[in-house]
Image (tube, rainbow, N blue to C red):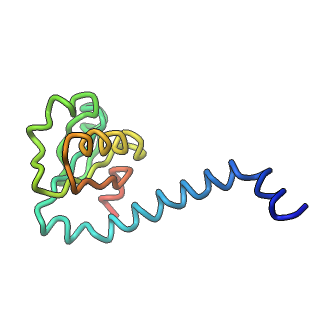
Amino acid sequence: MNIQGVFEQYWPVMAVAVWFGYKWWNSKRIIAMLPELKKNGALFVDVRSAEEFASGNAPGTINIPLQQLGSRLGEIPKTSPVVLCCASGTRSGMAKMVLKKNGYQNVLNIGTWRKFLS
């Protein structure tokens, strides 16, 4: 089988691998930026439910559940960096889209809240 045949047969698997590779790299990049983000007054927002947040969270994060985010935008300044987290990175990815749509410029998704503990 030639390279084109391999690509045609395995492109879905390769696409998933690339996606997870990007998510891993991006979260490592944000973790490396945490000291600078903290120094610049970043707001750390955990978008999990209140129950999930109460069962464990990273120090310094505030809890604004994803389903409440739209009605609580006033609690998030547009002038500071915003770092989002959740259980896996999916809800924080959705939250990032909500914030970007509402004019927030400096929004980062770190993925799981446990990465703040690294």
> How many numbered marks, from 0 up?
0
Residue at (16% x, 28% y) in the render: 71
> Looking at the picture, does residue 76 appear above or below residue 14?
above
**19 or 57, nearer to the observer:** 19
Q: Which of 46 and 76 is in front in this view?
A: 76
Give x and y (percent) for residue 12: 68, 48
- Please identify the quarter of the rendering in which residue 81 is found: bottom left
In the rendered view of the protein, which quadrant contains the N terminus?
Answer: bottom right
Q: Quadrant of residue 20?
A: bottom right
Quadrant of res 97: top left
Residue 100 locus on image (x, y percent): 26, 45
Q: In this view, does 2 lie above or below 48?
A: below
Q: Where is residue 51 in the image (x, y as percent from the top left)?
A: 27, 31
Say which residue appears at 49% left-offset and 60% top-offset. 22
Side (left or right) of 62 relative to 109: left
For the point 40% across and 46% down, which residue is it? 89
Q: Which residue lies furthest to the right in this view?
A: 1
Quarter holding the C terminus is bottom left
In front here: 34 or 103?
Answer: 103
**Residue 26 vertical placement versus 105 (above, below):** below
Residue 72, position in %: x, y? 14, 33
Q: Which of 100 and 56 is in front in this view?
A: 100
Residue at 69%, 51% in the rendered image? 13
- Looking at the image, residue 95 sits to the left or right of residue 39; the answer is right
